[in-house]
Image (cartoon, helix red, strand yellow):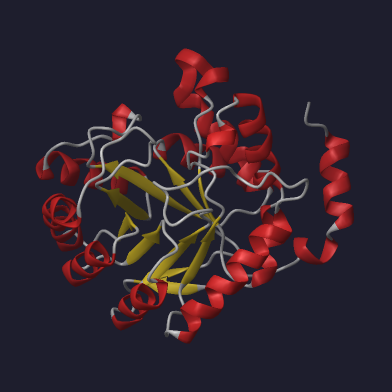
């Protein structure tokens, strides 16, 4: 059971990290003040394999319609992906991804909606940025020099996801250290150096809590790890860049109320000073964050 004493102990051990401030920047002409106001990213899945059915859009028209709704509900950014991260999902080549992504990106940008694209493919990255995408949600670890150069050339931002493997579709076991923060800091420090060397300055750090590692299939192990990382997020902010979290589901615990899982995790993520919330449940997360601001 999570207790007030545990929270107090975490803060007592890390006072400097609790006071850390992160870089603020504009994306697509929109300024973000992460140190005082967290941002919300809504989700559109263009893959039929995606398990969160409410976010699946199988046509460009439905995806654009959902994007407009999410923006009206308060999403600052819309994240679009054309390949599911589920282990059993079909692999989708770059051409097929681009055929789905590009019309949606162009239509949403025409509405002045900020767009993030989730991919680990250089070809998808190039086409998406050329179509107007503002953010690359990078879910791989290969060809990063090439990819970061593309991001910099388009004055875009990048979400660097922690991935133990070549990409999110090729992961094995997660290194479940007692304290995950040193491992995360080491990974992100190296990636930040590569990104900056290639001209990227608009950076988010994402611990990758929603990815499907083999040894995180046990629900209690996975949820305990996710909760620990959420509450320790403020320690990652010492790296100087805002932290993004994809809020998970925990359907084993929530069952028929699974759509309430992300709001629950959002509370923990907010306590850990998360800067960007990636969610399938934009209105619920906006309500959680607004309510927490009243305290």
Q: Position of residue 139 (x, y in %)?
A: 41, 56
Instruction: State left or right for residue 13 relative to residue 262.
Output: right
Instruction: State left or right for residue 118 relative to residue 61.
Output: right
Along the line of sight, which residue is nearer the eye, 135 or 70?
135
Question: Can residue 158 be seen in the rendering of this structure?
Answer: yes
- Rendering quarter of residue 20: bottom right
- Rendering quarter of residue 159: bottom left
Who's the residue at 38% across and 59% down the image? Answer: 137
Q: Position of residue 86 (x, y in %)?
A: 38, 36
Along the line of sight, which residue is nearer the eye, 279 or 85?
85
Q: List the single residue furthest toward the top.
A: 256
Quadrant in which the C terminus appears:
top right
Quadrant in which the N terminus appears:
top right
Along the line of sight, which residue is nearer the eye, 256 or 210?
210
Instruction: State left or right for residue 281 relative to residue 124.
Output: right
231 over 140 or under it: above or below? above
Q: Position of residue 180 (x, y in %)?
A: 71, 51
């Amino acid at each position: 059971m999570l207790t007030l004493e545990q929270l107090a102990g975490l803060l007592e051990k890390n006072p400097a990290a609790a006071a850390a401030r992160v870089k603020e920047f504009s994306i697509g002409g929109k300024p973000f003040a992460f140190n005082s106001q967290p941002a919300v990213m809504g989700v559109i899945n263009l893959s039929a394999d995606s398990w969160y059915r409410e976010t699946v859009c199988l046509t460009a028209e439905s995806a654009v319609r959902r994007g407009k709704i999410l923006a009206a509900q308060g999403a600052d950014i819309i994240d679009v992906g054309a390949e599911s991260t589920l282990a059993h999902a079909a692999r989708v080549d770059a051409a097929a991804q681009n055929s789905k992504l590009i019309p949606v990106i162009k239509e949403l940008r025409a509405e002045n909606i900020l767009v993030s694209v989730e991919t680990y493919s250089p070809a998808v990255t190039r086409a998406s940025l050329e179509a107007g995408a503002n953010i690359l949600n990078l879910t791989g670890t290969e060809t990063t020099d090439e990819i970061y150069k593309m991001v910099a050339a388009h004055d875009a931002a990048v979400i660097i996801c922690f991935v133990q493997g070549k990409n999110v579709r090729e992961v094995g076991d997660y290194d479940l250290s007692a304290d995950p923060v040193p491992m995360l800091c080491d990974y992100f420090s190296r990636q930040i150096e590569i990104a900056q060397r290639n001209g990227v300055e608009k950076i988010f750090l994402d611990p990758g809590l929603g990815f499907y590692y083999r040894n995180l299939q046990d629900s209690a192990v996975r949820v305990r790890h996710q909760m620990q990382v959420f509450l320790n997020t403020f320690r990652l902010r010492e790296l100087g860049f805002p932290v993004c979290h994809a809020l998970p589901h925990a359907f084993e615990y929530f069952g028929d109320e699974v759509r309430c899982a992300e709001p629950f995790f959002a509370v923990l993520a907010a306590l850990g000073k998360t800067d960007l919330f990636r969610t399938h449940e934009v209105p619920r997360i906006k309500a959680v964050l607004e309510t927490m601001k009243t305290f």
